[in-house]
Structures are given as structure tokens and as C-alpha cells.
Amino acid sequence: MRVSVVQMQIQMENKKANLAHAKDLIERACLDSPDIILLPETFNVGFFPAEPAPLADVMEHGESWILLSNLAKKHKVNIVGGSVARLGPEGQVFNTMYIFDRQGQEVAMYDKIHLFSPSGEKKVFEAGNKPCCFELDNKLMASIICYDLRFTELIRGLALSGAQVLFVPAQWPHPRSEHWRTLLRARAIENQLFVVAANACGPMGKVVNCGYSAVIDPWGQVLAEAGEEEIILNVDLDLSQVEAVRQRIAVYNDRRPEIYKELLK
């Protein structure tokens, strides 16, 4: 399975320019015949506008949804659509990921569960409450968004559900680049799955996104890592490695949740 990871520079609140740029990058990625393309977090409006509602998508009628659906169908490629600002039915705004199959059909939608309180994300976005597992090409996968990466319980639960690949779109800034790089490897190692991560890069507003998008195998080996500039990473994943690693070090067989479940309340 080939993945294309799009590391993209995003303009704050410039939805028209961001969508045009995303379209260009997706079509460039398609030249390498990927099975799945991954975009960064809130690639349509940036992270995050003070008033995102006027720029937010309205479910399947939104510009971002339509763009990704059409490109998936046109190029017969699966797209894990990073995330976009989405307007809810009661006027609330969600940080939402859409996943499309090769026919351009939405197979899953995920609203970011953990909102980054130090930046005030909780004051602007509504938190989701449903984890995200889905199938693409008959393979079970899962997705989180950015800050979710710090919450090990969520990711272990996705792994226990059978996910072999974890997709992580983000807008992760300096000076926390080493947190990003370390946590990606840690989640791959401890859950024995592939981690495919697309970060934004370059300045946006008052922050500078650090880049370092990466693809990491279940043994913790970094198969590819970007620097701090725009780039598309193309990597082939051998999903049989997931079971091989889990047999070599039987973490899932050796778990004792009956003992430590009380600590996780």
C-alpha cells in the first residue's frame, strides 16, 4: 500500500488560496500512483481563525468536502482529508476530518476529540466524542488529529479495535518539534502499527509550523521524514509487518487490563 503524505504551507483565513493549493498538491501526489493521500489539519482555513464560522464548511455541501470527493473520484484514490473547519447544525464549529474512498464516497468523518486548551481551541471549536476507525481497500485503519497524539488511551483503543495504520494530520508548531517527532515514534512502537503523519509547515499567524511529517513502521523505524519545507512523501507500507511485530513482542497477549483499568478512570 502506497501512501502520499502532503506537507503543506497554509495561509490563515485564506480558504480560496488554501483549497487551490491543496488541489495542486493532491494532483501532484497522484503522479506517483498512491493508494491513500493524507493532508494536514485545518488545511482549508488554518489553525485557527478567531471567527471560523463564516469560513467553515457545511457538511457535504462545503467547498472542501466537494473538492476532496471530486479529486478522490477523478484520480481513483483514497483521501484522508486532514481536517477542515465544519459548521454544525446548531452553529457550532468542529475540527473535522473527512475520509473518501476511490469512488469519492465519504466512508468516515471524525471530529477532533481533544482540543488544545493552551491555544484557546476549546473556545472556538466544539469537541467531538466518537473515535474514528474505518476501512479503505479492505484494510482497517484509524485517525486522530494533532493534539489527540498526546492521549495514549485513545490510540491504544484504536489499536485494540484492529487498526493497522494510524493517520495523524496536524498543525504542530515550533518550539515543540521534538515532542511531535518523539510521540509519533512512541505511538508506533507501543501500539505496533504504522503511523502516517502530515504536518503543516512554515509561518502562519503568530506561529511557525515545524513540518517533520513522517511515516513510521510498527517497529518504530522512520521510513521517511520531511524537513521544514513543503514536500510530498511517497512511501510503500507492507501491512504484514504489523502482525509480524506483534508476534515477535506479544504486547497484546501480555496486557493485564483487569489490573490497571481502575487507574484509567
Image (cartoon, rainbow, N blue to C red):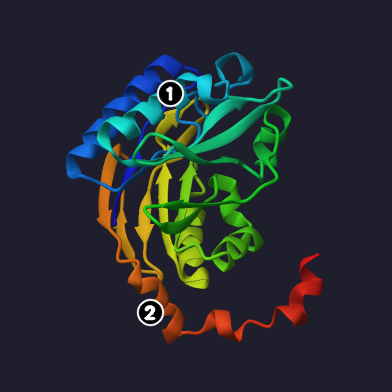
| Residue 201 x %, y % | 39, 37
Please report contact status of discs 2 and 1: CB closer than 8 Å, yes or no. no
Judging from the image, what secondary structure is the residue with disc 2 in?
helix
Near-viewer residue (97 or 8): 97
Amino acid on which disc 2 is placed: Ala
| Residue 61 x %, y % | 52, 19
Judging from the image, what secondary structure is the residue with disc 1 in?
helix
Q: Is residue 200 visible?
A: yes
- In this picture, residue 158 sits left or right of residue 71: right
Tell me the quarter of the picture where residue 193 sits: bottom left
Residue underneath mark 1: 66
Tell me the quarter of the picture where residue 78 sits: top left
Residue that extends furthest to the left in the rendered view of this protein: 31
| Residue 130 x %, y % | 66, 47
Near-viewer residue (96 or 189): 96
Q: Looking at the image, is mark 2 or mark 1 nearer the viewer?
A: 1
Amino acid on which disc 1 is placed: Ile
Label 1 environment density (alpha carbons within 10 Å; few <14, some 14–19, many ≥20): some
Label 2 environment density (alpha carbons within 10 Å; few <14, some 14–19, many ≥20): some
| Residue 67 x %, y % | 39, 24
Question: Going from the N terminus, do you reach mark 2 or mark 1 first?
Answer: 1
Rendered residue at 50%/62% (across/down): 163
- Quadrant of the frame with the N terminus: bottom left
Near-viewer residue (189 or 161): 161
Rendered residue at 41%/76% (across/down): 243
Residue underneath mark 2: 244
Gap between marks 2 and 1 measured at Cα = 39 Å
